[in-house]
Image (spheres, coloured by chain):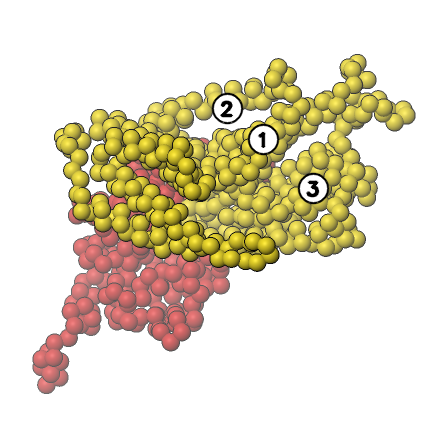
Amino acid sequence: MASLAAAPPRIDVAATIKEALMTAFVSAALLVPLVGFRITNRGGDQFLDTRWTEVAIAVALIFIGRVFLVLIRSGSYILPAVGGALVAAAGWQVGVPSEFLTVLAVAGGLVIILRAGITAYTEKRAASGAPAIGDGFADGYRKALPWLASALIVFALVLPFLPFSGRHTIDIAILVLTYIMLGWGLNIVVGLAGLLDLGYVAFYAVGAYSYALLAAAFDFSFWVCLPLAGVFAGFFGIILGFPVLRLRGDYLAIVTLGFGEMIRVILLNWVSFTNGPDGVSGIPRPSFFGLEFKRYPPEGTESFHQFFGLEYSSVHRVIFLYYLILILALITNYFTRRIRTLPVGRAWEAMREDEIACRSLGINPRNTKLSAFAIGAMFGGFAGAFFATRQGFISPESFTFLESAIILAVVVLGGMGSQMGVVLAAVVLIGLPEYIRDLQEYRMLAFGAGMVLIMTWRPRGLLAHRDPTIRLNAGKSS
Amino acid sequence: MSGDAPLLNVEHLTMRFGGLVAIDDLSFTAATRQITAIIGPNGAGKTTVFNCLTGFYKPTVGRLTMMRNGRPWLLEQLEDYRISRDAGVARTFQNIRVFPEMSVLENLIVAQHDKLMKASGYSAIALFGIGGYRAAEREAVELARYWLERVDLLAEADDDAGSLSYGAQRRLEIARAMCTDPALLCLDEPAAGLNPRETGELNKLLAEIRDEHGIGLLLIEHDMSVVMEMSDHVIVLDYGRKISDGTPEQVRNDPAVIRAYLGQEEDAVYGEGA
């Protein structure tokens, strides 16, 4: 291995040129129709312009880029890195005909530099016999996990009182925690039971509307409605579960997707019941053991700030909501960790691994799957009720497929079945974009790029690691 | 139940897939404390028999009666998971099906699902830390430890099942099937892919299971060293039909079996006919 790395890189010039030419040819075939022709409006008439210079420069850049990639692959790092830097700098400084070329040159140059750096680093590690980066990381992570979890919980507990956390920060934290809770709930279905659910937002919606409508119709308080919302959502989970019992993988995903859309369309069109697209407003806010968060409470009642002798502040309610979702999320987490060590949880995981083997061991697949759907849905319902009471207003707009996709992204990018992974992914995917809202149009671009990067470098999720739920040789862990 | 009472009684089993007759009017019995082997050339329908027995296929025609706890269970009418849970038929698979990302120990705990579900109040009571679940789980671990020792996987108990070698995964599958406390253990080519030393260990294990645990074993096997050495009773299938049935000695000398395996020489046919 060492002698191989020490040998000067051998480059097959003809093969390199041939590969780069192939790439250039394919990109030319794509770029001619996509970039080469452009329809412009001038004085009400449409003209077909051609942009052959752009196409030519782009194809040339792609040719150079491919040559650099081949060089990196065959073990030569300096030349491509310098070349990439030159191209990026040239794209930045020299006046090229269009913005498209600037982006291509700069981004392409940076990718080449990154690629050269990463390949050089990993090759060097491999040559020196050091374990792959991922292995060492996973091991250290496992040891640090209990400390990390405790530290995070303490941080979450004191967050509202830290000097830098204003109302904006707490609001973002509430949003992130909502997604963490949804992620942990969906993790039961996707991560543990292995049932790919693309319609999880339906249960979120059922929970939210359960609370909104029950509170409006019967004047129930939040604390009565919260369990009811969970029960209703769980019931809908079972309704969804029955038709999809025999389905797996892609087929299951499509049916759950359809189910999620059905719920949304029903909410949108059943105007007499749900008030349709106008949504439900005036949803009651939660109270702190009967103490409301109002400046002027109704006659005969006391409000939170009067009871504790505080100056009235609207932040009180936000802080209360923050702790509410924190507790709900932690309950979800505790439940999941506990159920994993119980027969049902183990059956879920076994079902994910091999359903046929499960049947041969006497595990009832119907009950196992339905319980996973129902319990996952129940936590979605809790989160939905929280969402309704936090917003005070809900409409079908809030429960689109994009929401399901984001929740699923949180679970998948975090690492299926990993609790800490969900936290990390929710902070990265929900928290960061909220903080960098100033970047406006680049927000979603960064979101997508982040996903691509995570899937490239850690295809099984950021923190994909599973610890056995029970050990025979306790303490003697290898 | 006497030792000779048929544990499993298969009568007129027929399985058709469209126009293809995979099993044609097959009848046989398997007894407790005996190893019954089903052999036959490739495509003879051996695995199909297993799939009918364990509920993965519903037989076109036939009655499959399993005696357990003093009462008969009609396997063709039971849902597949109940065949294991209630009728006590456990199986292993030709292409190994362990739970690869769960630990070896977890594989064996999952096999005791039904018992643990009842002990934990269907997981609902044990969720709050009450009830006898902890004791039941300790018992389950002890049973798992016993079987891990038997199949020599004690040191690997906390490793992922998927990281085990091929032979170890086969042994794990047998241990897992035994953890369901079966009355009949069906093994689908347990010696496939094993080296001679491993095959020898397998033979020993199967004999111990038969003699110490007093259950019946049903075996599909290509490896004749296993079949002839281990079996008490051999059934030979060819094109879905039973062509021979008896002790290994009888089957070995049965001309029909030799014909099915080696093909019939033209001369021999004429020679015998004349």
- Please name the amino acid that badge 2 sits on: Ala
Q: Residue furthest right?
A: A299
Q: Do the residues labelled 3 and 1 touch (CB within 8 Å)?
A: no
Q: Name the residue under label 2.
A: A149
The nearer-to-camera label among 3 and 2 is 3
Q: Where is residue B226 in the image (x, y as percent from the top left)?
A: 21, 54
- Please name the amino acid that badge 1 sits on: Asp
Q: Name the residue under label 1.
A: A438
The answer to whether any part of residue B177 appears in the image is: no
Q: Residue furthest bottom?
A: B274
Instruction: Point out the tag, 2 or 1, that comes first from the N-terminus.
Output: 2
Colour for chain A in the figure? yellow
Q: Where is residue B229 in the image (x, y as percent from the top left)?
A: 19, 54
The label shown at residue A372 is none
**Quarter assignment of residue A230:** top right
Q: Nearer the viewer, residue B88 or A83?
A: A83
Instruction: Point out the tag, 3 or 1, that comes first from the N-terminus.
Output: 3
Q: Where is residue A190 in the image (x, y as percent from the top left)?
A: 50, 44
- Please name the amino acid that badge 3 sits on: Ala
Q: Mark 3 points at which residue?
A: A208
At horizontal 29% and vertical 42% (from top left) the residue drawn is A64
Q: Determine whether the residue tagged by mark 3 lies in a helix, strand or loop.
A: helix
The answer to whether any part of residue A315 appears in the image is: yes
Instruction: Point out the tag, 3 or 2, that comes first from the N-terminus.
Output: 2
Q: Nearer the viewer, residue A7 or A68?
A: A68
Q: Which chain carries label 3?
A: A
At horizontal 29% and vertical 28% (from top left) the residue drawn is A121
- The chain that appears red in the image is B
